[in-house]
Image (tube, rainbow, N blue to C red):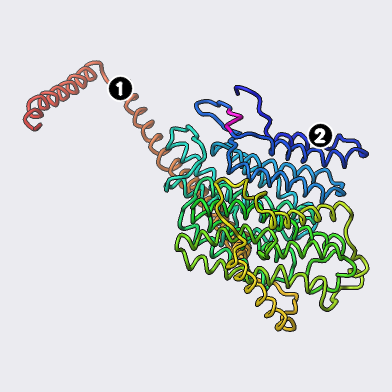
Amino acid sequence: MSEFWLHPSLILIVGGLLLPAVPARLRSVYLLAVPLATFARVALMSTGTYGQVPILDFTLVFGRVDALSSVFGYIMALMCTIGTLYGLHVRHDGQQMAAWAYVAGSLGAIYAGDLLTLFVFWELMAFASVFLVWYRGRAGSLAAGLRYLLVHVAGGLCLLAGLLLHGHEAGFAFVAFDVAHPTTAAYLVLAGFLLNAAVPPLHAWLPDAYSEGSFNGSVYLSAFTTKTAVYALCRGFAGMELLVVMGVIMSLYGVVYAIIENDVRRLFGYHIISQVGYMVAGVGVGTELAINGVCAHAFSHILYKGLLFMGGGAVLHMTGESRMSHLGGLFRRMPWTFLFTLIGGLSISAFPLFSGFVSKSMIVQAGFEEHLLLAAFLLTLASIGTFYCNGLKVPYFVWFGRNRCAAQTAERAADPPWNMLTAMGITSALCIFIGCYTPYLYDMLPYPVEYHPYSSYHLSESLQILLFTALAFYLMVKHLEPHATISLDLDWFYRKGGRAFLWLARRPIQAVDSWFGELYRVAGLTGLMFSARLSGRFDGRVIDGAVDGLATTVDAVAQRLRGAQRGDVQQTLLIAFGVAGLVVLALLIFLPAALP
């Protein structure tokens, strides 16, 4: 390395390792200082290529800072600071260390300039983030974390296979991670990215794990994994038309499952799938306006989705409950939590003056400009379900409506500690600020922005969709009461498939294996014993008999020779040599004529 370059991930990793040694009285200050230092480092970095490390015949690039990586790095570091503030009162050092290592993996992947460096940080994300699920301490969290880890290991293996094939094609000179050509290696890398982006049918890990994470761990989970995958798609697969189809499917699929979901955090998880679908579709469109829209929507999504998970986490933390069928009437006990969660719901619903309004519409507009009319209309349709779930269903059935809380839940209900409220307040202010002052966000985008969200057409269209959705909810609210049900998703196949495989391995396969093993054992012993008997009889009757007969013959010949006269012996030898000579002479005469 030609000169030292301080990687933002290094600040978080070293800061996490030193956390257990920090005195208790300085712990809160230290917890805020580390992510703030990381954010300052990200915000002050200038564009360029840094951290080039030569290894063998290729060079690893740890710091590719350009317009695309800068906007993602900025929001990741900012969300790390807000998330740390939100969980400031959590006393488990391991949970804070896992969260920082998770963010370090995300930042490392974003600034990676080659596929090998990307893979290293990609795996750091997977293995650090699973602890944010396990730290909730429930049996369901342990199972969900194991499924989460298995799925992401499979995605990592796809990425590794792709990078090795790519390296082999390039003579193991791992070139810069840029737009990929359609090769087998590229499709394997794409599969790894799509799994982290939760593209159906590889999506069920997201609501499964995020709903089982700790109250503050799910805030981190909602922000980093899928958006890092979106960044990777922007970097490597912009303009791939297949992604438009996948993105539209994601946006509708997530909305449908969110509508029928009862658990608040699972509902928010399904809406991550839906909103990431907009970004995946934008990557597929691939124009400058579309990529700007993807970056802007990822930026605003991290904030408002983090805010929604903060609100849901606050309800879970204070009441111990997250199912809407067991909540209701919490407005008087948790007014600030309600207000901040409502702001998050309005932001994700693309309500005017909120962040989603100025970012989501860029992607839809890019679709219309490229004459992808069906895709653009379907993305617009998905926004109806988004407002219904996040702006109407959750606020009404959690904070208003009929009180369905158990006595213990109602007694515990109250606004959370100051640090949680402060984090939610800062995020809410940012959601409103971005929606009102667009240059703050638009000036960070990788391409020059020529888009004005507050046009009369866009305003009227959005307000009509939102108001008619609200009217339909008002008329149908009595029939929309949440129920304690379980919605089967595509994870049913690998859950049941795994159980079926274990049953086959433990019962029929093991039984057949044991039966054949016993058969082999019995057959082998029987064959060995039969062989031993046969060998003994052959040895005793044939070989021993032949040896005894030969010995008798030799002995008789010897006795005869001893009793014979010297002349008889000489006569016998002459006859034997004569016969041998005649045989040799015959061979010399007739054998050459017989040969070809």
> Where is the C terminus found, in terms of image quarters?
top left
Q: Is residue 336 above or below residue 231?
A: below
- The part of the chain drawn in magenta is 48-52
Closer mark to the observer between disc 2 and disc 1 = 2
In this rendering, the answer to whether 53 lies above or below 459 is above
Q: Which residue is mark 2?
A: 18
Q: Amino acid at mark 2?
A: Leu
Left or right of 435: which side holds 56?
A: left
Instruction: State which tag comes first along the sequence, 2 or 1.
Output: 2
Question: Which of the 4 image quarters holds residue 401?
Answer: bottom right
Please state the horizontal and vertical placement of residue 490, each as a whole percent of the image: 59, 66
Measured Cα–Cα span from mark 2 to mark 1: 104 Å
Q: Residue at x 63, y 23 (%)?
A: 3
Q: Nearer the viewer, residue 506 or 302?
A: 302
Q: Position of residue 144 (x, y in %)?
A: 70, 58
Disc 2 and disc 1 in contact, CB within 8 angstroms: no
